[in-house]
Amino acid sequence: MDQLMREIHQQPEVLKHLTTDHFGQFERAASAIRTRQVSNVLIAARGTSDNAARYAQYLLGHQHRLPVALATPSLYTVYKTPPNLKDTLVIGISQSGTSPDIVAVIEDGQSQGMLTLAITNEPESPLAQAAELVIDCHAGQERSVAATKTYTAQLASVALLSAALGADGSILGTLRKVPQAIEQTLAQSDALESVSNQYAQLTHTAVIGRGFNYCTAFEIALKVGELAYVAARPYSSADFMHGPIALVEAGYAVLLVAPTGKILPEMQELAKTLQEREADLLIISDDADTLAAASTAMPIPHGIPAWASPLVAVIPGQLLAHHLAFAKGYDPVQPRSLKKVTKTL
């Protein structure tokens, strides 16, 4: 088992400890947030962390009715015209906490008197030092270039903060079931390794999700791109129908992220449309009827609600990206042209 696969398999243990041993930090952060007049959230992130921010847009909007915007760091570092903020919680999400543009957004939030929060795996990083509040992802050192356990730890951190903000014990209880669901999903690794050989010639694909799993489409597309060098384009199912569906012809590979929830009927209709176009369908779902439409079915366990499903639904995508890299003859631990920490201005 290589380093990346070890880190993929560490995710249940990381999330188990985060949801049990370290919940106090989320309660403290939530208490501080409640003392301030917060009516908006602005999140700065890059790469994989940006996909965790997309999850926060849906989760904090759904559970707390908060408008959540993604920051445009170039306005801070290049154009020197940051937006004027009012009653805003400014969050920076970064695995390493070292990228200057993300730190700049937090520093500007501080200078404008806004409450600032860092979500990072490095609690002594520049990002953490710049922020008023810090949440430590407690994922342990991640040596592989591709972020896996730090990504799900970021998702869990967003969800745990939301749980603490709402003081809702049922949300916390659900999150404590996620590690077992991930363990069950990891059991399909060998099957996906076999499947990956069928896609060794894959060069282009579309990855589609919507709602809570919009972030999952982006994250799986990123992993398949950076590890297996496949031009994987992420889409909302709604956006896909507005034009990109014209790309689909016989044999075109499309990966659908379609767990049970309010989005499922739309995804099922899209699957039917894609079948009519003779697409090669890979489907991540916990619904048997939906999986039956797939050329390659990637099941996840039942019982995880839609809002928590991104923590589980991304796992088959991580495994597929890893195995596909090997099938194509690439090193998934050290992808070409990439470094573990990327600093952008």
Image (cartoon, grey):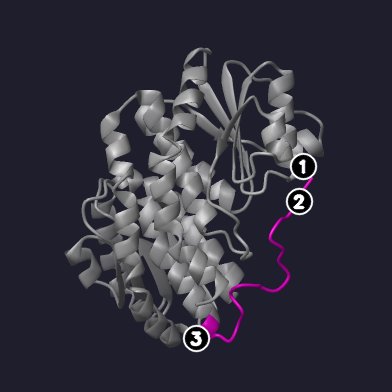
Helix, strand or loop for disc 2: loop
Tags 2 and 1 in contact by the CB under 8 Å rule? yes
Q: Mark 3 = which residue?
A: 200
> Which residue type carries mark 1?
Pro
Q: Which residues are magenta?
A: 326-345
Residue type at mark 3: give it.
Ala
Which quadrant does the C terminus fall into?
A: top right
Residue at (51, 85) in percent of width and height: 327
Query: Element at badge 1?
Result: helix
Residue beneath the point at 53% across and 42% down? 53
Q: Nearer the viewer, residue 243 or 262?
A: 262
**Residue 343: mark:** 2
Q: Amino acid at mark 2?
A: Lys
Residue placed under numbered mark 1 in the picture: 100
**Callout 3: SS:** loop
Horizontal arrangement in the rendering, residue 118 relative to residue 40 (left or right): right
Whether residue 231 appears in this view of the structure is no
Task: For marks 2 and 3, give the one nearer the viewer.
Answer: 2
Q: Position of residue 321 (x, y in %)?
A: 49, 72
Few, some or many C-alpha atoms within 10 Å of disc 3 (few <14, some 14-19, many ≥20)? Answer: some
Image spot of residue 34 (x, y percent)? 47, 16
